[in-house]
Structures are given as C-alpha cells and as structure tokens.
Amino acid sequence: MNFIFVLAVGLVAGTLSGIVGTGSSIMLMPVLVYQFGPKQAVPIMAIAAVMANLSRILAWWRDVDWRACAAYSITGIPAAALGARTLLALPSRAVDISIALFLIAMVPARHWLARHQLKFSLWHLAIGGAGIGYLTGIVVSTGPLSVPLFLFYGLTKGAFLATEAASSLGMYLSKSVTFQRFGALTLDVALQGVIAGSSLMFGAFIAKRFVLRLEPEVFRLVMDAIMLAAGLSMLWTAAFS
C-alpha cells in the first residue's frame, strides 16, 4: 500500500512537471520523507529524478538546445556532486529543516525572478548552473530556480522542457554517483528510486499532449501552494519527530 501511494503521487507529479517543467520532486519528496526518512528519501528521489528527466528528453528529443544544456551542465554537474557530499555530512533533522525552508523560500523567489524581465546569455546559464547545481545536491530539487533561468534565456514549450530536463539529468546522475560512492545508494534504495521514477516517467508522456493547450502559469500557482504545504508539513515533522 505504501508503494501504491508513492506511485499514485508520482504519476500526478510526473504529469504536472511534464507540463510546467518542474514540481515532481517537490510533490513526491514529502511522501518519500514520510515513508523512508529524509536521509534515505534524498537518494531515492535522485534516482527517480534521473528517470523523470530522461522521459522528458525522450518526449521532446528534437527540441533540445544542446548549447544551453552544455553551458549549464559544465558547472552544474561538479557542483551537484559537491552539494551531495555536503548533504551526507549533515544530520537528518538538519536535512529535513533545510529542505522545508528551501521549498518555502522558493515561492517568493520565483515571483521575484518572474517580475524582472531579464534576458540571459550562455554565460548566465553557466554561472547559474554552478549555484543551482550545488543547491540541487543539498535540497533535492531547484526546479523553481532553473525554470526562470531557461525561460529568460529564451526557451519555451517543448524546447524549454527538453533542455531543462537534459541539463538537470547530468546533475542528478552526478548526485547519484556521489551517493553510491559514499554508501548512501544501496541496492534497496536504488530499487525504490526506480519504482518511484517509473510513475514519473509515465506521467511525463501523459503530459506531452497537454503542453500546447494548457496555461503553464495556472500550474505554477498550484506549485506555489504545493511548495508551501510541503515545506510546512516537513517543518512540522522535523519539530515533533
């Protein structure tokens, strides 16, 4: 029953993130924390995120902007490994609190970035990749930050979804390898990540048919509510567990 619940949330999360480009980790992470604890949930989510991003790449393969992907990944991949190593040195309660505070902080951060109509270059992507990559290693997902970064570069719809996914894929692979190297990614954890990731992958292909018809901003507002709810619930768990 626990895995059925995880799969159900993963399917919804994969569909929504396939439409707006982010949100699968934000929705699924509190469920994984509740089921497995924060230290185990993070490597499980890393495996699931690899599969989720791979599915978006496959769904929109022809639209990937490989120059933007390379600029973002060249700094983001090593930074994600460094962030993952930092995470493993932190106590579980600190991990729980840091993830919760990050999710809550992303709500005003996303709106602040959206209000400033900026135009980014490849250099901006490289600089942003370093900072976002390090944070990704620590706090599971930085989609609310990477989304405006690629939008301000000028990518939209399929090109945005595919390029953001391709860039994030390298970070999550780097993070997963780091977890495996330091003993946090066992066979059981990897299997749990594959199970969770399979529902995210299926949701991404369901989402493709809706991308051109639905208004992304509606779902971004929904993600604001989800981030607030997830962050507050995780703070509650950390305070009273």
Image: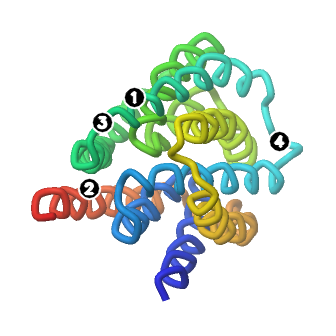
Nearest to the observer: residue 118 or residue 83: 83
- Tell me if mark 3 has few (under 14), some (14-19) or many (20+) residues whose alpha carbon lies within 10 angstroms of its own: few
Residues at marks 2 and 4, CA–CA distance in whole angstroms: 33 Å
Nearest to the observer: residue 82 or residue 16: 82
Q: Is residue 50 left or right of residue 63?
A: left
Residues at marks 1 and 4, CA–CA distance in whole angstroms: 34 Å
- Tell me if mark 2 has few (under 14), some (14-19) or many (20+) residues whose alpha carbon lies within 10 angstroms of its own: many
Location of residue 81 in the rendering, given as x and y in whole percent from the top left corner: 55, 27
- The type of residue carrying mark 2 is Gly
Q: Residue furthest top?
A: 123
Mark positioned earlier in the residue sequence (2 or 4)? 4
- Tell me if mark 4 has few (under 14), some (14-19) or many (20+) residues whose alpha carbon lies within 10 angstroms of its own: some
Mark 3 or mark 2, which is nearer to you? Answer: 3
Q: Which residue is mark 3?
A: 90
Q: Are marks 1 and 4 in contact (CB under 8 Å)?
A: no
Mark positioned earlier in the residue sequence (3 or 2)? 3
Tag 2 secondary structure: helix
Q: Are marks 3 and 1 in contact (CB under 8 Å)?
A: yes
- The type of residue carrying mark 4 is Asp
